[in-house]
Image (spheres, rainbow, N blue to C red):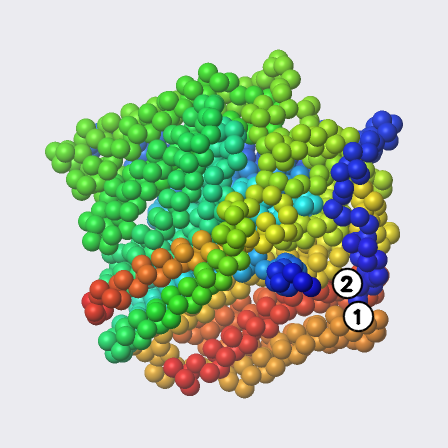
Amino acid sequence: MTDPKESPQKEELEEFAEERASLLKITMGPLIWAAHFVICYGLVAVTCAKGWDIAFVRTGLLVFSLGSLAAIGFVGWNSWRQWNPWETGDYVNRMGRAEDRHHFLGHAAFLLSVIAFLGVVFVTLPLVMLEGCL
Amino acid sequence: MTDTRPDRSGLPKPSGPYPPTEEMLAEPVPEEVQAAQAERLRAAWATPKGFRYITAVNNTEVGKWYCMTALCFMLLAGVMALLIRAQLAVPENELISADRFNQLFTMHGSAMMFLFAVPLFEAISILILPGMLGARDMPFPRLSAFGYWCFLIGGCFVIGSIFFDAAPRAGWFMYPPLATEDEGPGSDIWLLGLSFIEVASIAAAVELIVGSLKCRPPGMRVNIMPLYAWYVMVVGGMILFAFPPLIAGDFLFELERSFDWPFFDPERGGDPMLWQHLFWIFGHPEVYIIFLPSIAIAAMIIPTVARRPIVGYSWIVLSAVGTGFLSFGLWVHHMFTTGLPSISLGFFSAASEAVVIPTGVQIFAFLATLMVGRVKMTLPMLWIAGALAIFTMGGLTGVMLALAPFDFQAHDTYFVVAHLHYTLFGGMVFPVIAGVYYFFPFIQKKKLSERLGRWAFWLIFCGFNLTFLPMHLTGLWGMPRRIYTYPTGLGWDGLNLISSVGAFIIAAGFAIFVWDLIRPKHRQPQIARNPWEGGTLEWTHDVPEEAWGVRSIPHVTSRYPLWDEPKMLERIDAGRYYLPDAEEGRRETLVTSVIDAEPIQVQRVTGPGWITHMAAGFTGGAFIFPTFHWYPPAIICAGLAICCIIYWLWTSTARPPEAPSKDAGLGLTLPTYASGPASVGWWAMWITMLGDATAFSSLIFGFFFYWTAQADFPPEGAMHAEAWLVGLAALGLALSWALTVGARELNRRWLVSAARLCLVLAPLAAAGGAAALVLSVFELQPSSHVYPAVLCALTVWITVHAGAGVIMQLYCLAGSIFGKMTPRYDADIWNVSLFWHFQVLAALVTCAVMGLAPGVL
């Protein structure tokens, strides 16, 4: 145990084992996008139909959008670390070893959180630019 | 993999060395052993001869029939398009009557979507995916066959209606009130016929998802599987969330057509907008369900022609998964002119623009691969190039139409017709034809003609642009869709004539293509085994053809194994890898783990049989007779279909094996049985129920949609469901669930009698619960208002599911008594309790809505 790098490697090995049933992990970013989209659309639709206070709902949703962006940012940061291209120097992960799969899932999750982040920004724009229901 | 202790269920674990070492793989297999193994495999996988040929369930046979049937429907729908164009060639034309014209455009759209584009994805995937994964077959061959026969029966029924002047005629999206009020059986044919075909789609989705998750070759981790498999998984998942809302919509629509329950009738509280929502929640993702698997074909062809690995594998995975998600946030862009609040339109407009990003990413990844590779301009690549050009143009008009103010102008004009044909030809027709040229040597062991292929390409490419490019202008100059004729002098005459000429040029191109496809090729010399020098596993196929799929299932360690491992082909042929033999003379394939594809089980798969035809025929009867309001024969057919399916499951699925484990080759011993999450059947149930839960959620969405859209829902003084009976129903169904789960747990602890007692009580509790639910709404008048109607629809849904649940419980009871299900071999009860997890959730939600909504809302 003289090499300080050994224990993080062990942790990583454990993480490979935990990954077995985690294909869904890469969809975390898009799932946050989907939840954000449904909540924005649903709440605004009910607010407009029932005559609730749109200004209040809009402010609430803008705060919620920031929260969603932060959550996606967190997922993205985590998956960037899992991909870890700067330390490994491998951006492609095309071979069939366990660590390739591990880094690949990180890469895919990272890219998906980028697209989810952009998606949330796009869907938030109408909340910023349009004030009322009409 | 040296741990040989049985796990908790008493089933053995995999044992032996894994992964195989180079020395193990280098060891030769004696010639006589090879020959004997090949003989046994050949016998086990033999395709039935003579008239029994149609009982085949092998993916290669079913896939071919599926493709050819979809092609026939496409040609019929294409002829309809030619008739439409002939009618529109000149102003005030009287070639076709207005009513016939309505039938033609409705059927053209419906057939191209439901009988060609979506089934063709299933067909091609069933045909080529096992080859790419080095699998013997799909995990459920009879399910594929059942899906195919359903598709054939339903498709003939729907498309045949046009020959009897009885076809649907309200447009392919069947908007109420036009479609609900329409006289004659047209709308019913659409609703019931296509619902029936959707069953086949969901069956195929289950098959393909489980196939790509669990039937990959050992070592093919998720980061090295062919991109096609990624796309198939994404599209399978999309089908599960897109088709069920339409099935729920069809269910409500048919209740309105048959029993006058006013879901879409505003006079009695209904709302036609609900149909539009349900239809387009299906309809928009469907466009991507068509597009993604076709572009997946491009993702297989491009690395081969560029002779290098794809650039940006992860980026393409991102774009497939990302597009899959974003495509569910676009549906309202078909409804921009329905008067929704502008801020709501804003969300959908924004999401419609955002989906361009992942779609663009994959196209740039393809272009990058071509740029850095050494491109050989083969015929498939020519079609892919055409596809990219046309699809990009369709995408650009899509960006325009996604802007609500522009859409207000262009809505329901020929501009939209031009846009959708550009996306569908570029996104589906061209890549699929490229795929036909590319995979034809794999499918038929023959090559298509280079010369005819180029003729077909240029005719279709030029004809297509001649037809649809002017339509943008026709639309901008104000010509609406779906009019059967138009007056002269509006500036539309010349443009329409050009479009009509173009349509016939496309038809000429298709005639050449189809001739090339079907012309006799027996004089052609034997083709090379890997004619395009591809790198993926489908090119290990046997020439001349063998029905076994793959001689032995290889251990894969890279994305393009044929490029990276030169010895692989020889070792596959020698039977050096896994499952080189069929000692018991039965069909088997290898099941591997989801993420890392470690071998975990040898799975028996079903062989040829007539039962699939009978099940499909009776299922067809159950859907087709109600079209003519003949309910007794429909009910009899439904009963017989259930009997057939039970017989099929009982005789050939999850039977206790003769030996608990067997030698899978390379020293590896694998169990022959799995239950619960380790088994393919459990995954199939999980996936099916996910789709079912989506349909149920759509009904609940309907309930709250009415509440949102109306000032008084539930209306003042309305009768409600009897609250105490609703409570009793919740109790009964929850008890039935608990008893089912209890039976599973008791059974695996060898308390068989107690488990059987639970399985006797569980159906009684379920029946009692369902009866209480029916009684709670018994006094309501569903045709009087949408509120009682929606309560009754929910009751029907839960009751029918409870009926299915009871049959499953009794099936397990019978299995336990007659030795099909034992404490060790208990896959059935695992699958049934999974069904009941979903059922109890749906029942509790329903009871909460029915019992609590009157007080809360």
Judge from the rendering whether residue B598 lies leftward or rightward of residue B393; answer left or right. right
Q: In the rendered view of the protein, which quadrant contains the N terminus of chain B?
A: bottom right
Judge from the rendering whether residue B688 lies leftward or rightward of residue B173; answer left or right. right
Residue with the mark numbered 2: B826
Quadrant of the image occupied by residue A14:
bottom right
Q: How far across and how far down the image is residue A121, in percent?
A: 32, 61
Q: Is residue B680 above or below residue B344?
A: above
Judge from the rendering whether residue B573 lies leftward or rightward of residue B106; answer left or right. right
Name the residue at 42% across, 43% down. Answer: B362
Tag 2 subunit: B
Q: How far across and how far down the image is residue B464, in percent?
A: 33, 29
Q: CA distance from mark 2 to mark 1?
A: 8 Å
Dot 1: what SS? helix
Residue type, numbered disc 1 = Asn
Judge from the rendering whether residue B240 lies leftward or rightward of residue B100; answer left or right. right
The residue lying toward the viewer, choosing from B652 and A104, is A104
Name the residue at 86% across, 29% down. Answer: B30
Q: Is residue B560 above or below residue B240?
A: above
Name the residue at 70% across, 72% down. Answer: B740
Residue type, numbered disc 2 = Asp
Which disc number belongs to residue B747? 1
| Discs 2, 1 touching: Cβ within 8 Å | yes
Quadrant of the image occupied by residue B710:
bottom left
Tag 1 subunit: B
